Image (cartoon, rainbow, N blue to C red):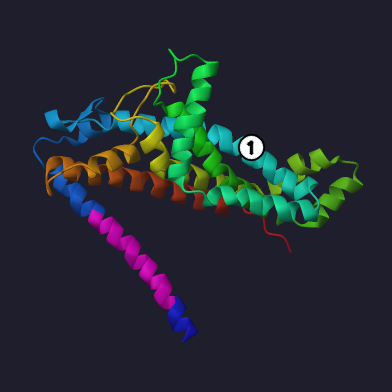
């Protein structure tokens, strides 16, 4: 009975994934088959204005990648530093307190991070850099909030990967006269490289798919810019804004949401496939 229940659980998850792909593909096909839509212009166009039949996804894609890059510049170095400290420096009592406290950040609703970015990070940036430079809604503050959100995810997974490295490798390095920092950087991190890379790619996927933070703090309206102090709408933010409006079913605006969702799905799917290949390539097996 237990085997049957476990099989059904896995089978239902597979069916759910297939259902998502079918719905996205079906609705996106309804969009791409319209005469007003050109696939080449969809991926290379610099304007997203459905009311005048301009469907260039580059502004939405660029702002999504911009916020993701800012988030990872915060989450990767801080997350790795926290993971190394918990794995190599902190004693057992400190680790038992700090790791659950850090993981509490992942339990905070993302809408709270969005308003934190809008009411705390943005005013701070405007004070430091200048109110005439930093707009009230900007991708920079949204990216910083996303970095704080993703930090515990990367730190926790990397710490698990570092802790899984056999103690004998550390002891051998210490026996050769290596310092604790040298052991952490030159011995433990290379041995846990597959887990670290998997954590980073998982964090990138999480950042690309984040919705509420960018919907609140990044701004509304597609804007092709690489300036993090300007407002720009991401793909997820656009989906939230448009789907919350009065759109008629089977309209071109309605179907465009699924086209954007399909692009998001393909990006995250490619990242997951890349993660699996990297993990298989760099995995270390110890006996």
What is the quadrant of residue 8 in the picture?
Answer: bottom left
Instruction: Name above or below for residue 108 compared with residue 116.
Output: below
- Give me the residue at 34% from left, 48% from top: 265
Task: Tell whether 147 sits left or right of 170.
Answer: left
Residue lying at the far front of the rendered structure: 119
Element on which disc 1 rests: helix
- Magenta span includes 10: yes
Instruction: Name above or below for residue 239 compared with residue 49.
Output: below
| Image x and y of residue 228, in percent | 44, 23
- Give me the residue at 40% from left, 20% from top: 135
Magenta span dominant secondary structure: helix
Q: Quadrant of the C terminus?
A: bottom right
Residue lying at the far left of the rendered structure: 35
What is the total number of numbered labels drawn onto the structure image?
1
Tell me where the magenta segment starts and ends, as one range.
7-23
Any part of residue 161 in sight: no
Task: Answer few, some or many: residues within 10 Å of disc 1's Cα (few below 14, many 20 plus, some between 14 and 19).
Answer: some
- Magenta span includes 207: no
- Judging depth in this view, the residue of 174 and 133 nearest the camera is 133
| Image x and y of residue 282, in percent | 61, 50
Task: Tell whether 139 sits left or right of 36.
Answer: right
Any part of residue 61 in sight: yes
- Give me the residue at 47% from left, 48% from top: 109
Task: Tell whether 211 sits left or right of 222.
Answer: right
| Image x and y of residue 271, in percent | 44, 46
| Image x and y of residue 26, in percent | 19, 54
Instruction: Name above or below for residue 118 compared with residue 92.
Output: above
Residue position marked by numbered label 1 in the rendering: 78
């Amino acid at each position: 009975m237990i085997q049957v229940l476990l099989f059904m659980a896995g089978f239902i998850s597979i069916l759910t994934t297939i259902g998502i792909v079918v719905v996205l593909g079906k609705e996106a096909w309804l969009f791409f088959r319209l005469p007003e839509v050109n696939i080449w212009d969809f991926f290379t166009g610099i304007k997203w204005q459905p009311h005048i039949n301009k469907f260039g996804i580059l502004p939405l894609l660029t702002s999504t990648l911009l916020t993701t890059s800012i988030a990872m510049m915060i989450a990767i170095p801080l997350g790795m530093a926290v993971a190394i400290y918990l794995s190599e420096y902190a004693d057992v009592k400190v680790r038992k307190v700090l790791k659950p406290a850090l993981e509490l950040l992942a339990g905070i609703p993302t809408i709270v991070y969005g308003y934190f970015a809008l009411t705390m990070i943005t005013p701070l940036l405007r004070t430091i850099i200048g109110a005439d430079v930093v707009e009230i809604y900007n991708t920079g503050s949204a990216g910083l909030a996303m970095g704080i959100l993703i930090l515990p995810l990367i730190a926790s997974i990397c710490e698990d990967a570092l802790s899984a490295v056999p103690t004998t490798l550390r002891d051998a390095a210490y026996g050769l006269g290596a310092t604790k920092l040298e052991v952490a950087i030159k011995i433990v991190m290379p041995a846990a490289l597959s887990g670290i890379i998997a954590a980073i790619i998982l964090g990138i996927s999480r950042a690309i798919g984040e919705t509420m933070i960018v919907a609140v703090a990044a701004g509304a309206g597609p804007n092709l810019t690489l300036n993090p102090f300007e407002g720009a709408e991401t793909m997820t933010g656009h989906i939230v804004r448009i789907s919350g409006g009065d759109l008629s079913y089977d309209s071109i605006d309605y179907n465009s949401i699924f086209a954007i969702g399909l692009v998001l799905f393909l990006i995250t799917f490619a990242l997951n496939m890349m993660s699996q290949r990297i993990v298989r390539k760099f995995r270390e097996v110890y006996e």
